[in-house]
Amino acid sequence: MSITEVIPTVSAAGQVFSRHLHSPLAPPLPDVAPGQLWLVQLAPEAPLPAAAQHVLGAANVVIYDRALTAAVAALPVGGYAEPASGAEPAAARSARFAQDGWSVARLLPARLAPRERTRRVQDLVDELAAAKVPGRLSVQVFAATADGIEEHLSARFDDLAAIVASFPRDTRLTIVIDAFGGGVAARLHAVAANGLAG
């Protein structure tokens, strides 16, 4: 049985969001769906946590930092993954895949410096905001600390970077942004343009 405590919290922008502390059981993860973008932090040397197994088994597209190449080996046959490099920044590429109707997993190393982690999340927020994702959109943040404390936050999309900045470095985050959801199927031109066919 999970013990849950709900803590109202005020963001830097003055918005109230709720923090749900769960111990010792993890909160349930939502189903991976078209138009969603998942950010998942992984430790390269550690076994895949449940959140990573959940999303890697279901996401259409995985974009990962090269330090996490071994984790991508867990993809099911037929899964599509690409390293976060090249001419198009990973945030822009992730946002474009999600906008095209794909479910996207963006994998980040677990021990990024807090400022770097916040910058990467802010880059993604900026790309999605440019694609007209509303600031009031509800996002979910699942956090796990090294000592086993797990937390689930529901917050506004425009508060996401500030919320991420509030977590210490050793907290692994899984963020679910249902940016372009609603059951829209991936557009066929995305398959041809991005080499996902076959």
Image (spheres, grey):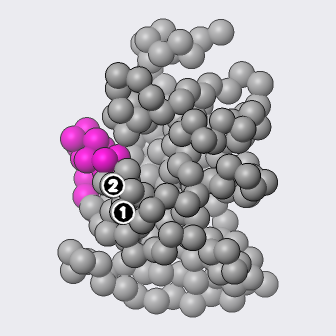
Image vertical order of residue 114 relative to residue 2, above or below: above
Residue located 55% across and 60% down the image: 111
Q: Which residue is mark 1?
A: 115
* Residue 12 locus on image (x, y percent): 24, 77
Q: Which residue is mark 2?
A: 119
Asked whether residue 183 appears in the rendered view, the answer is no
Residue located 76% across and 37% down the image: 74
Q: Is residue 73 left or right of residue 99?
A: right
Instruction: Confirm whether the magenta stretch covers residue 60.
Output: no
* Residue 173 locus on image (x, y percent): 54, 63
Give 129 or 126, whichever is nearer the viewer: 126
Give 4 or 80, whichever is nearer the viewer: 80
Asked if the residues shown at circle 2 and circle 1 are in contact, with their CB atoms under 8 angstroms apart, the answer is: yes
Graded by Cα atoms within 10 Å as few (under 14), some (14 to 19) or many (20 or more), the crowding at tag 1 reads few
Graded by Cα atoms within 10 Å as few (under 14), some (14 to 19) or many (20 or more), the crowding at tag 2 reads some
Residue extent of the magenta highlight: 123-137
Identify residue type, mark 1: Arg
Residue located 53% across and 12% down the image: 195
